[in-house]
Amino acid sequence: MKVNGTHYRSLWWDDVKGALQIIDQRWLPHDFRVQSVETLEDYAAAIVEMRVRGAPLIGATAAYGMALAVADDPTDANMDRTWEYLHATRPTAINLRWALDRCRAALAPLAEADRAGAALRLAHEIADEDVEINRMIGVHGLSLIQEIAAKKPAGEPVRLLTHCNAGWIATVDWGTATSPMYQAHNKGIPLHVWVDETRPRNQGALTSWELGSHGIPHTYITDNAGGHLMQHGQVDLVITGTDRTTRRGDVCNKIGTYLKALAAQDNGVPFYVALPSPTIDWTVSDGVAEIPIEERDAQEVTHIQGRNDGEIGVVQVTPDGTPGGNPAFDVTPNHLVTGLITERGICDASEAGLAAMFPEMAQAAE
Ligand code: MRU
């Protein structure tokens, strides 16, 4: 997507530097900084510190990290060490494990001398595939927006609500939840997006930055406002992203997603989740019981980052000594999810729905 008129992906390979370039998201939306990732420690720090974030982007970054490690030492032992090291960076988004597994499985049968080149080609392939998957999620999700628009008086916007940032910077491009919005906007369908702030890290500000750069009307709201807006008929459709979706369609996403789904159900508002297939964890079924939830630093809750007089800084919001709790994700059970928007089409959030959409993956996991 475009930043000040220039098209960017959220990561890209620089042949001259021989290194991955990322947008350091810690400074957005206030400052656009590009960083070169040059050591394996840099890769791990980039994921842990959320310079790169969002399930698909974490996966693509890890694939480049594996490529760097293999270029340095192509042995099986080093691939295993790298798998463990990068896998330990963040526990919830399954794309991390998916990408590391895919790299190791593709490289292991090759001669050591061939691995470095193949690993970099595979990382590029994973990044390119992510772009296409997300574009197709937009193509399929567009139909939901078109249906709603068709029932409205001409010119009246379709009002969406989204949580966190499942936008282009959380993926390689397009985003997942935002992809249908871009597709609809590009087709001239009037939209208005309610953007949840998404405390504690306020990823909603990233979504606002993205939508604003693309000219999509939106309003940044507190996390607690969604239920009220739904009660008053101000939301036609909710679309969120996901960090891990189980084979029966339970959706793990940024903390607070579950409460939005409850409010949506109580108010008859359709609640859809944009789901790229690498985000399905076919090995788990009950999301609440089986998905590890990342507990992040309490300081993300007790303090907040923002811009003051042009300077980016952090302020404390709690009294000295108040303990903060910071579970970063929650699970929305499948019965609260109206449907899953995948790159192959829209399906029920159920074992049968996912298996019918991705039969070869469901079978491989048996
Ligand atoms: O902690 P984050 O910012 O990495 O969490 C991101 C989310 O929860 C997104 O909704 C999810 O990864 C989907 S991104 C397309």
Image (tube, rainbow, N blue to C red):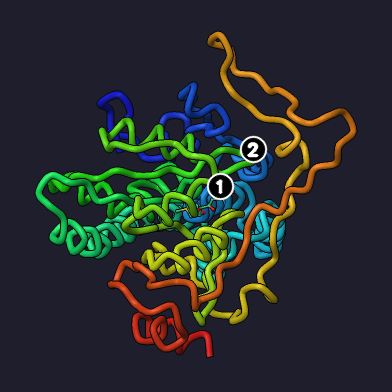
Q: Residue 42 carries which label?
A: 2
Instruction: Give coordinates of residue 237: x percent, y percent.
Output: 34, 59
What residue is drawn where x is 56% and y is 52%? 62
Nearest to the observer: residue 69 or residue 183: 183
Instruction: Give coordinates of residue 311: x percent, y percent.
Output: 58, 12
- Asked which quadrant contains residue 16, the reply is top left
> Is 265 on the left or on the right of 155, as rendered?
right
Which mark is nearer the camera, 2 or 1? 1
What residue is drawn where x is 31% and y is 67%? 343
The residue positioned farthest toward the top in the image shown:
309
> Is 186 on the left or on the right of 225, as rendered?
left
- In the image, is residue 225 above or below residue 303? below
Three-letter code, disc 2: Asp
Label whose residue precedes the other's in the sequence (2 or 1): 2
Q: Which residue is labeled 1 in the image? A: 224
Taking the image as drawn, is residue 201 in sight? yes
